[in-house]
Amino acid sequence: MASPTPLLKDELDIVIPTIRNLDFLEMWRPFFQPYHLIIVQDGDPSKTIKVPDGFDYELYNRNDINRILGPKANCISFKDSACRCFGYMVSKKKYIYTIDDDCFVATDPTGKQINALEQHIKNLLCPSTPFFFNTLYEPYREGADFVRGYPFSLREGVPTAVSHGLWLNIPDYDAPTQLVKPLERNTRYVDAILTIPKGTLFPMCGMNLAFDRELIGPAMYFGLMGDGQPIGRYDDMWAGWCIKVICDHLGLGVKTGLPYIYHSKASNPFVNLRKEYKGIFWQEDIIPFFQNIVLSKEATTVQKCYIELAKEVKAKLSKIDPYFDKLADAMVTWIESWDELNPAKPAAANGKA
Amino acid sequence: MASPTPLLKDELDIVIPTIRNLDFLEMWRPFFQPYHLIIVQDGDPSKTIKVPDGFDYELYNRNDINRILGPKANCISFKDSACRCFGYMVSKKKYIYTIDDDCFVATDPTGKQINALEQHIKNLLCPSTPFFFNTLYEPYREGADFVRGYPFSLREGVPTAVSHGLWLNIPDYDAPTQLVKPLERNTRYVDAILTIPKGTLFPMCGMNLAFDRELIGPAMYFGLMGDGQPIGRYDDMWAGWCIKVICDHLGLGVKTGLPYIYHSKASNPFVNLRKEYKGIFWQEDIIPFFQNIVLSKEATTVQKCYIELAKEVKAKLSKIDPYFDKLADAMVTWIESWDELNPAKPAAANGKA
């Protein structure tokens, strides 16, 4: 890790849901301008998003999504930032970084601006260690290593598929916690990156997230949220449960920790409560479902894993609410659309690493 | 956690293997003097350890161990700091803190001396969350909480049985890593405490370790090391694998992270290599053994779990080396000795929490 981080300029797209705040791009300009942006507009397609000069971008609104996917467009959420996953699908790059428009550049404890994207790239290019816990955290960082007692056979690690970054200032709380602790701010800079162990689920937040499209892209579906759906704010959670189960099955790694962004403003807790309240009930059943799922030996690609997951969702979660029946169908549609837009390469790029 | 930490003066013993360095106790005096010390001398019983005035302590040498345990004393290692576990057995307190004599008081990034014991007490008095990962680390710390998507049914947590602290300066590396990186120092202060997830093993280091004797004490056996044994430096590792499997089975938590101590000197890597080299091979089989072990429903106390583990060790690890046959017997002797010195209380103090 002592060598300079490759910037991967031609291998990474930045996917952003609707940008409501133009300061956002100005603040990130020094870090984002070298990259291609994919902006997915979640609301009224007649509104125009003005992107400042100098950025290389493509913008998709609902009309574009409908035109490109035809009837399959119903798997992409409308009027919800979950629509961002359309950007993952149309990208042709190996890596994706996705960030919300209320996330600004954070500073580390020395006052230096944090290049979040660079840290995500470091995380993705460096192996993960899901099979045994290293008490000094990321063993591949400069000044760190595997500690005494760490099995040597596991020190090569496995490829990293996902890098989950954190947030200073406004923490990513649910509506009840927001309501109870309106003034709580996250000021603790934890200088750590760690692999989430195999078999352990985590709440994946889509605010500051990077992943390897070739390794895990088809599982990064943000579900059905927003307009016409009974639930919101579970788009990234859904994707997080799915990707973790699939990464565990395929022997891929998920990291969390650095980099931090500065999350500038809390969303409205009353609105959030309305979006979340069914999810708060449902997750009590959904999480045991994901904890107990066993994918078959035949599920050797992300797509095959995801189709198996969709079948299980239909069989076991539909009894919670008819919504899951619809979601299971949308999961299949998502994979069909993904494969149409991303025809298989000669090399088994999505196969087991 | 905003309220003052209870000091638990009458409920905690500090267990220290042979003290070779009297600066050690002087440096810790402000923090340790209120507590009772149990010193377990690992070498020649005719040598005298001079404890500075003002400390309340009891000291056991090999003659004492032989006298107290009789023929069962063969389960306690000789000429190895693994003998410290005798101190866990003779203690009558609820909590134990154990520390090596080359561990000094560390300072945090603001330059303040770290009261390691106080942080361990905080960790032990605060629940653990082994069933789901919280991305902002310890959810019960001031300024932190459970993040969006963390199931509400799991937010009560479970009792914490073990608090594993870390080390600044000399990291706890194995001999091969020491040889390869003789100059590496740990200077990264990671301001985090986290629960090691259920189902995940970790390399537990005995340098800076606290635990709840009532919850997990009988499993904190440091095995057979040192004089007459084919292996060393795996005493704490052995205990770590055993306690983790048992904590997972009984629904107890294991925390790692803060507090740091300052580890002043690296042990000799050549000597360490001689002690470790069999362990380096053996752990490749031992760790899968512990990862796959399933304790029975009848194993409802730590003792019952440990006896089951001993049977499994005899059945499955003896084929690696006859040492494991001897170790399995010693595990049973250890439990017999523990129960003799710690007769069951009327309340099920060692039962499932």
Image: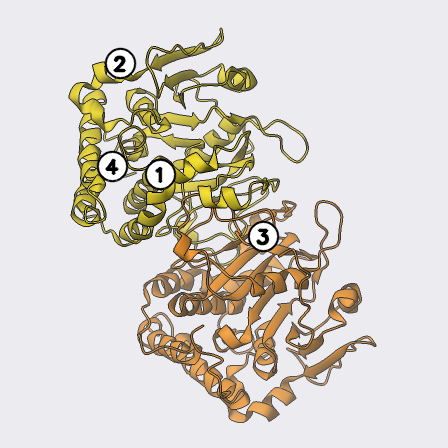
Chain colours: A yellow, B orange
**Residue B296: % across, % down:** 31, 74
Q: Amino acid at mark 1?
A: Tyr
Q: CA distance from mark 1 to mark 3?
A: 25 Å
In the rendered structure, are the residues bearing label 1 and label 4 in contact, judged by CB atoms less than 8 Å apart?
no
Element type at mark 4: helix
Question: Helix, strand, or loop for circle 1?
Answer: loop
Within-10-Å neighbours for mark 2: few <14, some 14–19, many 20+: few
Marks 3 and 2, Cα distance to the nearest angstrom?
47 Å
Mark 1 and mark 4 lie on one chain; the one further toward the N terminus is 1
Mark on residue B116?
none
Quadrant into which the N terminus of chain B falls: bottom right
Mark toward the start of the polypeptide (2 vs 1): 2
Residue corresponding to mark 1: A234
Of residues B248 and B174, which is closer to you in this image?
B248
Label 4 CA crowd tier, 10 Å (few <14, some 14–19, many 20+) = many
Name the residue type under label 2: Asn
Q: Is residue A157 above or below residue B96?
A: above
Per the image, the residue denoted by label 4 is A302
**Image disc number at residue A63:** 2
Residue A173 seen in render: yes
User: Residue sitting at 26 percent across and 26 percent down?
Assistant: A76
Say if residue A344 shows up in the picture: no
Q: How far from the left and from the top, in percent, is residue B163?
A: 56, 63
- Do discs 4 and 2 belong to a common subunit? yes
Mark 2 to mark 1: distance in Å? 24 Å
Assess whether mark 2 and mark 3 are in contact (beta carbons under 8 angstroms).
no
Q: Are marks 2 and 1 on the same chain?
A: yes
